[in-house]
Amino acid sequence: MSSLEERGDVGVGAAAGSSSASVGVGAVGGALEAVAGGPVLAGMQEEAGLRREGSGPESDPDAPPKKRVRLPEGESGKLEERLYSVLCCTVCLDLPKASVYQCTNGHLMCAGCFIHLLADSRLKEEQATCPNCRCEISKSLCCRNLAVEKAVSELPCDCGFCMKQFPRSSLERHQKEECQDRVTQCKYKRIGCPWQGPFHELTAHEADCSHPTKTGNELMGILDEMDQSHRKEMQLYNSIFSLLCFEKIGFTEVQFRPYRTDDFITRLYYETPRFTVLNQTWVLKARVNDSERNPNLSCKRTLSFQLILKSKVNSALECSFLLLKGPYDDVKIKPVIYHHVFSNDTNETDYVPLPIIDSVECNKLLAAKNINLRLFIFQIQK
C-alpha cells in the first residue's frame, strides 16, 4: 500500500510538475512574442504549419509548387540596379534601346555604339575590337543577343512626363498615346496657335483658344506661308518628274569601296569601279568630312562625292544626276539633283554633299564593308 501511495503521490507530483512546466513554457512564449513581435512569431508558426502539412500523408507529390513570396520593394529595387549594371552597354554604360550585339566573349554593345566602333576602325584603318576584352569584332563575328533584348524591354523605366514606371517595351506607346501629362499642341496650331502643354489641359485650352475666331485676312496670311513651304517641298518632286520625261535616262547600282591615300598621314576615301551609263564610262569618288585630318575625332560626320567622266567626248555633255539608296540598304538619303556640263576639260564635278540625314546614318555607311547606292543620270538635249 505504501508503495502504491508513493506511486500515486509521484504521479500527482508529476502532473503538478507538468502543469507548472506548461505554465513556464507559456510565459517564455509570451515573452518571446512580446520581444520579437507578434507577426514574426505568427509567421514562424504558420511556416511550421505549412511544413507539417507538406510532410503529411495527404500531400500530393504531383501538385504544382507554391508561388514564391514576393521580395520587399527595397530588395527588388536592388535587383533592378544589379540588372542595370549587368545588361548595360560596355561602351556608353547605358541600357540598350534597340538591338544588342555581343562579342565572341559575351560582352554587350548597343547597336549605336557597335556601329560607331566599326566606323571608327574604318576611319583609322584598324581592326575594331571589343572595349572590354580587345577581341576582334565585326558584323560577321558578332551576333545579336535576343535574350538580353527581351530582358531589357521588361525592365521598368520612368516616364519623362508623369514619372510613373512602365516596362520599356510599353513606355513609348504610353508617352505617345496614354500619358495624361505628355506635351501636346493645340489643334489650331496650323493657324498660328503656339500653345504647348500637358494633355489633360488641352480640352480647357481649346475651349478658350482665340485663334478659331481670327478674321479672314489673318487666316489668308497664314495660308500663304503654308503654301510657300509646300511649294518648296513639291519643287524637288516636280523637277524629278520633269527629268523622267527626258529621252536619255540611265541608272545603275554603284558600289563604293574604301581606299587609303599615299600621303604620309593616310586618309580614307571611297571609289567605285568604272561603270557605263548612256554609252559613257564614269567613276564616282567620295570622301569623309571633306578629307579633314582626323575625322574619327569628330562627332559630326558627312560624306561628299564627285562624278567623273572617263570617256572622251566630241561635244559638251550636259547632265543632271542624283544618288539614292540602294535596293538592299536601309540608309536614309534625301534626294538632291545636281547639274554639270561635262567636257574633255571639265570632266569632274566638284565634291557635292551626299544628302544623308544625320551622322548616325553616315556611321552606318562607314561601318559597312562597301557602300551600295543607286545613281541616276539624265542627259539634257538642246
Image: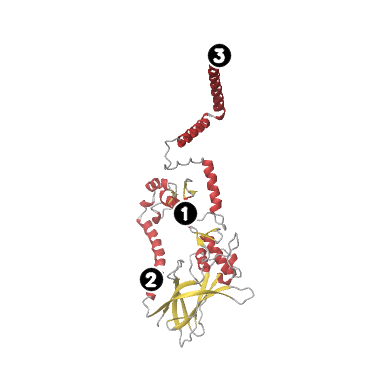
Q: Which residue is mark 3?
A: 3
Residue occupying the point 51% across, 63% down: 360
Q: Quadrant of the N terminus?
A: top right
Dot 1 falls on a residue whose secondary structure is: helix
Mark 2 — residue?
A: 238
N-term mark: 1 or 3: 3
Q: CA distance from mark 1 to mark 3?
A: 82 Å
* Residue 250 x/y as whole percent: 41, 78
Q: Is residue 195 visible?
A: no
Q: Which residue is mark 1?
A: 150
Residue 357, position as x, y percentages in the image: 48, 65
Query: Residue 345, percent across and down?
Result: 52, 84
Alpha-carbon distance for marks 3 and 2?
Answer: 126 Å
Whether pointer 1 and pointer 3 mark residues with C-beta atoms closer than 8 Å, the reply is: no
User: In terms of depth relative to the viewer, which is nearer, 93 or 335?
Assistant: 93
Tell me the kind of residue under disc 2. Asn
